[in-house]
Amino acid sequence: MTPPTGPSADRRGFLSLLGLGAVAVASGGTLAGCGDKATRGGGTQNLDKLSALIPEQKPFPGMPQPDIKGTRPVPDGYTKYPAQLVDAIADKPGTGGPAIRAMVPVWGPAPPSGRSNSYLTAINAELGATIDFSAQDGQAYADKLGAILGARDVPDLLCVPNWEVEKLARFSDAVGALFEDLTPYLQGSAVQAYPMLATFPAGAWRESCWNGRLMAVPNPTDGPFPWALFHRKDLLDKAGLTAPKSVDDLFAIGKEVTNPGKGVWAYSDIFAMVQMFHKAPGTEEGWRLKADGTPEFKYETAEYRQAAEVMARLYKAGYVHPDIVASKGADAKQLLQSGKILFHQDGPGMWQPMQAEQQKITPGFNIQPVPLFSATGGDPLAWGDDEPISYLFIKKGLGKARVEELLRIINWCSAPFGTKEFDLREFGVEGRHHTRDAAGPVKTELGFKEIQNQYFFISGRSPVLPPYPQTPQFVPQVLAYSNETVKYLEKDPWDGIKFEMPAKFKAANVPTQDKITDIVRGRRPLSDLDAVVKEWRAAGGDEARQMLGTALADAGK
Amino acid sequence: MTATTNLRASRRRHPERPAWEEDPGIAGQTAKGVVLTAVVLAVLVPLWVVLVTSLSSRDTINAAGGLVVVPRELDFSAYRIIFSGGQISKALLVSTLVTVVGTAFSLVLTVLAAYGLSRPGSVWHRGLLFYFLLTFLIYPGLVPSYLVVTGLGLKDSLWSLILPGAVSVFNLVVVRAFFQNIPGELLDSARIDGAGEFRILLRIVLPLSRAVVAVVGLFYAVGYWNIWFNALLYIDDNEKFPIQRILQSYILAGQAPQTSGAVGATLPPTLAIKMAVVVVTVAPIALVYPFVQRHFTRGVIVGAVKG
């Protein structure tokens, strides 16, 4: 094992990177309390000025037409697998050189690694390169990132999920010091050398710029909404009830269905959705502009206060499952599956896997999102953005030929739905990792064990919703919901400006959130909210406000 | 005043003893029983729930809405699943290896260092002790530790789980205090008989210190068995994951940040599987405990009450 290598740097730069590691750990919670010492960090980048860097978008010809169109940023959807798959890439992208080290997140049991995983072997053979995956626990990814960035010990390909970027103070310094500048390889028409990468939406590329350069390959999101309020439609139907359309309905249904004797309550913690119903801001981490043009945070708005009152009343009325009231860790999904709660707020990604799994166990099982409504009249408001899921960085200093090889491999892995490459990447080898029936591929047990999105995290895609044969209604339903909801997408005044929030602000985030949780759950009086907001302002809130205000002025918005 | 005291004293069976050495009355006995039962239940009930859930079918878990308290059947399918993949058995082997080798290694280092530091005449005695104690106060930090471990070429090696924490200063201090308690005359007489330091350590000191070695060994063993964070940092090859990393990945599975597409579209393990992994992880240590705990009081108290 060689000692960590990397570009040469002066001592000061090196020490600042060490500091970065320490802050990263602090925000990860291991050494909480040190974070507030780091008052540095924070920075702004006006992405609109970078349009010359952005790769030209060009659709790949000959792809199957979608069955249902999505209103951007909602992706298009397919309800059936195409009869003919396109062979999009003829040449092997790899040159058979030394193994490529890649670090990717994985949630759940880690898949077998190296040669003991026949899925990896099959795809590596197709790539003409050996990719040596280090599949790291997604939950502890920030800790691992903090250590390897601080020690300058990065693999050839490093996947950094978007939500981890926000946790890593002074991330842009690390990007500049450790990763290859991809601008000369991908900007403008240069991207046409990698036709799959050329299909990515421009917005995702724009987010991949750091320090005014194109630094990463994005993995664009396939759904802009962070939250949906799911309900057990089968159980509501049985009770003769319909989905709520107002806050009064939330209380009426809560009263109707909550039955502690039978162990049934109405809700999990649905505070984010209640905020959305009250039209509190939520897109730019919760910032918006007041009428006079100064930024204000959600905590300071009347809408947030109303939402907190409503949520506190829901708790007080006893409509929230007691396991949830008692702890952070209750498994709300399990409660929803078992019908112990009827409503649960979660990411839209919960929908399809839960429906597919539970309909096998509970006949008639049907979860649906509650259509978005406004608690205060007028149009509803939906939080959401089109920031990528993750970014893929290439280690600095590998040389032009190697970088091009890596980009060709990323290009292969980014082949869109409808190509043979996509099919192999997603479902492995037919007969081994999946079988194929009239509806499409069905993963085998080995497929589930060995395929854990490894190559997905070293790729991007022009996102689409593929068909789900076990839940044929899913794609039409999710697109109907999304196309309706996207009409009310919150406008982000800072769209096109990229921030790194001050470290102090980041550090205050979770403690403040915990205090508000106490208030909403009735452990502190509602009147404490003012004091909490005041503390939050002193603990970095005002500093962040200043930064956001200056950023707008600088960008001429 | 005196009369009252006498009256009270006379009610007791052994007036000559202080009150706290008296056998408790019925009320005292009951209160003691209730408190102890509550403590035991607080420990046993969660273990019971975990065990029962791991042996329940999916229908039972669904009906219970999560953790199962009352067993309805014995369903070993969760155990069959976790042992069929080979990953858990491999991780158990890794953890066993690290625990056995690590504990032996740590005990050798700790005993040698503690013996040296327990003899007032040894070279650099105070300086070295102070140096060891400093590590109580100053933690090297994540990144420097990472740099040292990777710089030594230990990444992806099981030694990275053993070497960085091979000596615990707390354990060292406990063992040292125990050694200091051994009468100096005993060692002097051995010396007069011609025994060297190693022979004294092996033949006199260690046989007298079985209790403390057992306890400290258990501390080390539990530490190595529970090792997780170092494995997260230094082990990339998942063939070398210790059991705790596997446990964590099972328990937190299904908590992937969800988007509507491919991310997280894998089969999350059922609750029964998660609980089965917990049982497999906890059982070995829980089984060893009863055999070592009888040394516990003696081993630890001796160091604590030395004047």
Image (cartoon, coloured by chain):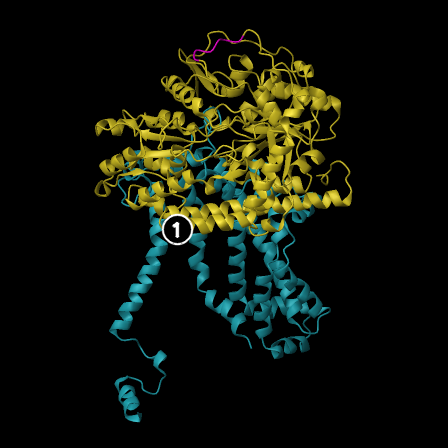
Chain colours: A yellow, B cyan
Q: How many labels does the image show?
A: 1
Residue A146 location, x and y as percent? 62, 42
User: Which amino acid lies under the numbered mark 1 shown in the image of this protein?
Assistant: Ser
Q: Is the magenta stretch mostly helix, strand or loop?
A: loop
Residue B130 drawn above or below residue A140: below
Relative to B194, A533 lies left or right: left
- Residue at horizontal 30 percent and vertical 30 percent from the top: A244
Q: Residue A265 appears in which quarter of the rendering? A: top left
Q: Does the magenta stretch include residue A64?
A: yes
Whether residue B96 is visible: no
Q: Nearer the viewer, residue A186 or B302?
A: A186
For the N terminus of chain A, give its image quadrant. top right
Magenta residue span: A63-68
For the C terminus of chain A, give its image quadrant. top right
Tell me the crowding category of disc 1: few under 14, some 14 to 19, or many 20 or more residues within 10 angstroms, Cα based. few
Residue under label 1: A527
Residue B24 drawn above or below residue B239: below
Residue A351 drawn above or below residue A200: below
Whether residue A243 is visible: yes
Residue A556 location, x and y as percent? 63, 29
Circle 1 SS class: helix
Residue A111 location, x and y as percent? 52, 31
- Residue at horizontal 41 percent and vertical 44 percent from the top: A329
Q: Write down the chain letter for disc 1.
A: A
